[in-house]
Amino acid sequence: MRDNIHDVIIIGGSYAGLSAAMQLGRARRKVLVIDDGLRRNRFASHSHGFLTQDGVDPAVLAATARAQVMKYPTVRWVSARADTAQRIESANDADGAAFEVNVGNERHVSRRLLLATGVKDILPEIVGLQQRWGKSVFHCPYCHGYELNQGQIGVIAGSAISMHHALMLPDWGPTTLLLNNAFEPDAEQLKALASRGASIEQSPIEAITGHADVQLADGRTLPFAGLFVLAHFELASHIPQQLNLDMEHGPIGSVIKTDTVRETSMPGVFACGDVARPMASVALAVGDGNLAGASLHRSLMFSAI
C-alpha cells in the first residue's frame, strides 16, 4: 500500500494551496491537490497589490501557478470537490497512512492533510449587488481602491463593523457611508467620520444600477465610482467541521485556528489561506501557503503523529 499513499493531500488548489504544493513538490514529496475550481476572487477581472503581478487577471495568476506546480512530477491534480476527510484509526501502522479523503467513489490516503478550502462571501440582499461583485462592488480597498481614481466611494453598511471601511476609504476618495438601516452611529462614531471627511446617507438602498449607482428609497440616485461592502463569510467546505477542528470566531466570520506553523488542533492537519486567516489577498495567501508547505515538509521529516 505504501506506493499509493501521498505524503500530503491538499484540499483546495487556489493561491494558498498551490503555493504549498510548490514547496512540497520542490522537496520531491508526493502530493495530491484536490480542487473544485471555485476561487473566491473568480468574479474579479484584475488583481492588485501582488508584487510583479499587479493588475493581472486573477484567473491568469491561478492558471500560471497551476502550470508551474504541475511541472513537478511528484504532484498530482484531481479536479473535483472533496466530500469527506477523516483520521484513519490505524494511523500508526507500518505504511504511515494517517488521513483518508473521499472524492465521489474514490478514496485517497495520505500522511498529512492541508486544508486550503477558502471561504464564501455572504453578500447583502440588495438588488443589483451580486452581479457587480468584484467589478464595481468590492471588499478590499488595497486591492481595488486605487483604480477608482479618487472618485466618489460608497460604503454599504452591514453592521457597526462597517465603520472600519468608512474610516479607511477616504484615503482613496470622498466617502459616503450608506447606513441602509444596518446601525445608527453614536456620537463618538459620528465624530470619527467627520474627522475623516466621510459623509452619511440615512435613506435605505432600493437597488444598485448602472456602474455603481445607488437608488435610494426616497427616490434619489447617488452615482459612485465604486462601492465597498464588508461582507460576512462562511467556510466553503464542511471538512473542517467533519474533523472537529478548533475555530477562531471574528465579527464577520470564523476561520480555522492554527499555530505559528499553520498546524491545526488536530496533529497532522494544517490549514492556510482564507480558511485560516480573516485578512484576504492573493499576496497573503501565497505567503501563507509557502509557510504551510515548508512546515508540512518539516513535519514529515521530524514529527510523528
Image (cartoon, rainbow, N blue to C red):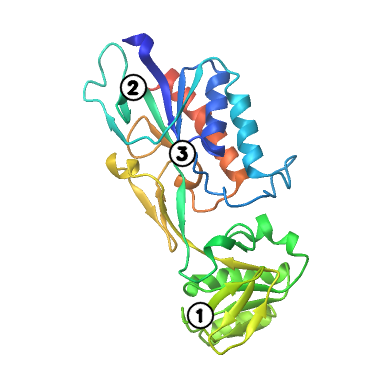
Give left or right: position of 35 versus 22: left
Q: CA distance from mark 2 to mark 3?
A: 17 Å
N-terminal of the pair, mark 2 or mark 1, is 2
Judge depth for marks 3 and 1 and give the one in front. Answer: 1
Quadrant location of the C terminus in the rendered image = top left
Q: CA distance from mark 3 to mark 1?
A: 34 Å
Q: Which mark is residue 145?
A: none
Residue at 72% across / 67% down in the picture?
172
Q: Which residue is mark 1?
A: 180
N-terminal of the pair, mark 2 or mark 3, is 2
Number of disc labels: 3
Position of residue 296 relative to residue 151, above or below, is: above
Type of the residue with mark 2: Val
Q: Which residue is mark 3?
A: 116
Badge 3 crowding class, 10 Å Cα cut-off, few under 14, some 14 to 19, many 20 or more, is: many
Residue 223 position by quadrant: bottom right
Position of residue 184 relative to residue 49, above or below, is: below
SS at circle 2? strand
Residue at 65% across / 83% down in the picture?
194
Q: Which mark is residue 109?
A: 2
Q: Extreme left residue here?
A: 89
Type of the residue with mark 3: Ala
Q: Is residue 98 visible to the viewer in this orientation of the structure?
A: yes
SS at circle 3? loop
x and y, in percent, of residue 87 in the image: 27, 29
x and y, in percent, of residue 84 in the image: 30, 35
Quadrant location of the N terminus in the rendered image = top left
SS at circle 1? loop
Residue at 55% across / 32% down in the picture?
18
N-terminal of the pair, mark 3 or mark 1, is 3
**Circle 2/circle 3 CB separation < 8 Å:** no
